[in-house]
Amino acid sequence: MNGDPRSKKRALFLIAYLAFAILPVYWMINMSFKTNDEILSVFSLWPRTLTLDNYKVIFTDASWYSGYINSMIYVAINTVISLLVALPAAYAFSRYQFLGDKHVFFWLLTNRMTPPAVFLLPFFQLYTTLGLMDTHVAVALAHLVFNVPLAVWILEGFMSGVPREIDETAYIDGYSFPRFFLTIFIPLIKAGIGVTAFFCFMFSWVELLMARTLTSVNAKPIVAVMTRTVSAAGMDWGVLAAAGTLTIVPGAIVIWFVRHYIAKGFAMGRV
Amino acid sequence: MKPVNQKAWWLVLPVVLCVAFSAILPLMTVVNYSVQDIISPERRVFVGTEWFKSVMRDDDLLDALVRQIGFSLAVLVVEIPLGILLALAMPARGAKASAVLVLVAISLLIPWNVVGTIWQIYGRADIGLFGAALAKLGISYSYTGSARDAWLTVLLMDVWHWTPLVALLCYAGLRAIPDAYYQAASIDGASKLAVFRYIQLPKLRGVLMIAVLLRFMDSFMIYTEPFVLTGGGPGNSTTFLSQYLTQKAVGQFDLGPAAAFSLIYFLIILLLCFVLYNWMQRVGTADKAEGSV
């Protein structure tokens, strides 16, 4: 905005970082338009023989594209549940003291700390017993284990940044809790909700081990379908790159939708 | 002080139920495995703490643990400051802000096995952009040949992959600071550094805490990316704890020892996170007391 050297340095840093961030992604997109032969034999900044075959494989095979649909279904269920249960809980943690509050708060996070390799088998047994195997609900529920604690922690951080006087004045003004929460409080922590929604989406979207363990055909997610490109006949690099490129799209759309929540931030309401 | 209100439990209960539903039973099952020798599903022998003892005596495990701690610390040292800087540099509003947000977030959205695969090609000197660029600069680099290069590549890949998480959290945290704070600071004639130190940093405490803990625990369990990129090599240079565990659990089908290993692994992460958490809280409150006006 203003042309002082500091903001110029800042812009340079930003451009340098963006280049660092984008180049591997460019390489993936570049690969997705190449034949496997070209990927492995020559260094080329753009495809010499442009091919759409890799994408054709994905769009013409139902087991490929239904992977995207399955992923989207359980990720959406998971994100909605995570936010709905985490919002009131985070409010309770940020505003009140109650029996065991600190312990429960930390316990929540410990559920993200279990190394998955060995825990997969009991997960499989649990969901088989419940008759939920190979359903979208199973994966959505299983992913709550790591997304709900994350959502509570992030939202609590944002809520604690809002001065408590705001709550008190609202209650004095005669607001009921639900009305205060929905019409005053939530707009104040929009940035936190936006970023939480995105992270819930993201962690559920890329999680492979649980999703693969709990599904076989009907709810098989795209991350699991992708592992098919590694076979005895070798890697299908082109198709993997194309599938990877396509996995970015839904998330990019999500962040596009929540960007106003994240970027605009503090609504000048009743402060 | 926050008021005491036991009714707040009603707000927390759904969260506890949701998480406990999938957390408690599997954990108990793993504890159950860890004290048995499972020869076949029907034949199990109670062995007490034997597996725990044998895991504690495992030298390879200790090596992997040391490597793991080194890697996770490196991750924090690079990603946290870089993430804060990036958040400060990102434009605050307008179309540019939206575009930058999307670009920054992209690396997070790529499935982890694809991340490893892309870097596998990207880092090769003959067919990858990164490897070829280094070769042009006359730097000899090979992530398959040199242990140092492999380690640095895994770190660089992690920085590329996860710095956006820190940046997005901090960015949202910065946007939640009311303009009034900045106006007060500019009336006082505060320098940019002072604004950062006394306004932005304290307000970012909450998000930084979660960013540090998340990056710490997730990097402590890193598995897919190094597995795909280097397979743990060359030698053992990029074999981190998780990979060692998986070799044991899946490779040798030894459920008992693997379960004991998992529990010890879990307790190590828990302990380190707990220390980190308490330390950050202490720093934060000391800061508040000192900086209160």
Image: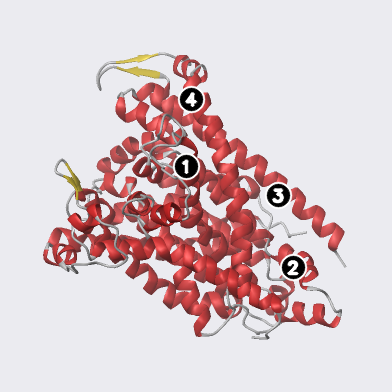
* Image quadrant in which you'd find residue A118: top left
Whether residue A73 is visible here, answered yes or no, is no
Q: Nearer the viewer, mark 1 or mark 2?
A: 1
In which chain is the residue bearing label 1? B
Disc 3 sits on a residue from what chain? B
Query: Dot 2: what SS?
Result: helix
The residue type indicated by label 1 comes to Asp
Q: Nearer the viewer, mark 1 or mark 4?
A: 1
User: In the image, are marks 3 and 1 on the same chain?
Assistant: yes
Q: Are marks 2 and 4 on the same chain?
A: yes
Instruction: Give the spatial CA distance, label 4 vs label 3.
Output: 29 Å
- The Cα atoms of the two marked residues, 2 and 4, are separated by 42 Å
Q: Quadrant of residue B72?
A: top right
User: Residue under circle 1?
Assistant: B149
Tell if the residue under mark 1 belongs to the same chain as the one under mark 4. yes
Residue topped by disc 2: B196
Q: Is residue B278 left or right of residue B59?
A: right
User: Distance between the Cα atoms at labels 3 and 1?
Assistant: 33 Å
> Which is nearer the N-term, disc 1 or disc 2?
1
x, y percent for residue A23: 41, 64
What label sits on residue B61 in the rendered view? 4
Q: Measuring from the top left, give residue B168's x and y in whole percent.
A: 54, 66
